Image: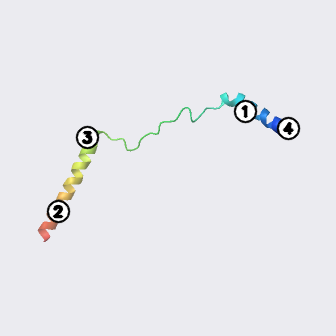
Amino acid sequence: MFEPFDEANKLIEEMATNNFQWPADRLNPKKVVEIYKYDALIILTLQVVTISKKLNNLKIKNRIS
């Protein structure tokens, strides 16, 4: 009756002793490279471009009306 339990216990012990061979992903999380890593100047430039486009669209609509 205890034979499967003993076999399972031996298997678990064997797995625990061989565990050092494999790297643990949880212990050493890999850093994900950020694709959208911009510096402040690029972000500010994009915001200015967006605002100027919106202002140009408002000017065009006012001329038509």
Q: Position of residue 65 (x, y in %)?
A: 13, 71
Question: Sequence order check: which comes first, mark 2 or mark 4?
Answer: 4
Please indicate whether residue 14 sits to the left or right of residue 51 in the image: right
Label count reads 4
Residue type marked 1: Met
Please indicate whether residue 12 sits to the left or right of residue 48 in the image: right
| Tag 1–tag 2 contact (CB < 8 Å) | no
Q: Residue furthest front?
A: 1
Q: CA distance from mark 4 to mark 3?
A: 69 Å
Disc 2: CA contacts within 10 A as few (<14), some (14-19) or many (>=20): few
Residue 12: name its quadrant: top right
Question: Sequence order check: which comes first, mark 3 or mark 1?
Answer: 1
| Tag 2–tag 3 contact (CB < 8 Å) | no
Q: Can you identify the residue that label 4 sits on?
A: 2
Q: Can you identify the residue that label 2 sits on?
A: 58
Mark carried by residue 15: 1
Residue type marked 4: Phe
Disc 4: CA contacts within 10 A as few (<14), some (14-19) or many (>=20): few
Residue closer to the observer: 29 or 2: 2
Q: Position of residue 44 (x, y in %)?
A: 24, 44
Above or below 60: residue 4 = above
Q: Residue furthest right?
A: 1
Residue 23: name its quadrant: top right
Q: Residue furthest bottom?
A: 65
Q: CA distance from mark 2 to mark 3?
A: 26 Å
Query: In the structure shown, which secondary structural element does the residue marked by tag 3 occupy?
Result: helix
Please indicate whether residue 60 sits to the left or right of residue 40 in the image: left
Q: Can you identify the residue that label 3 sits on?
A: 41
Residue type marked 2: Leu
Query: Which mark is nearer the camera, 4 or 3?
Result: 4
Question: Sequence order check: which comes first, mark 2 or mark 3?
Answer: 3
Query: Which mark is nearer the camera, 2 or 4?
Result: 4
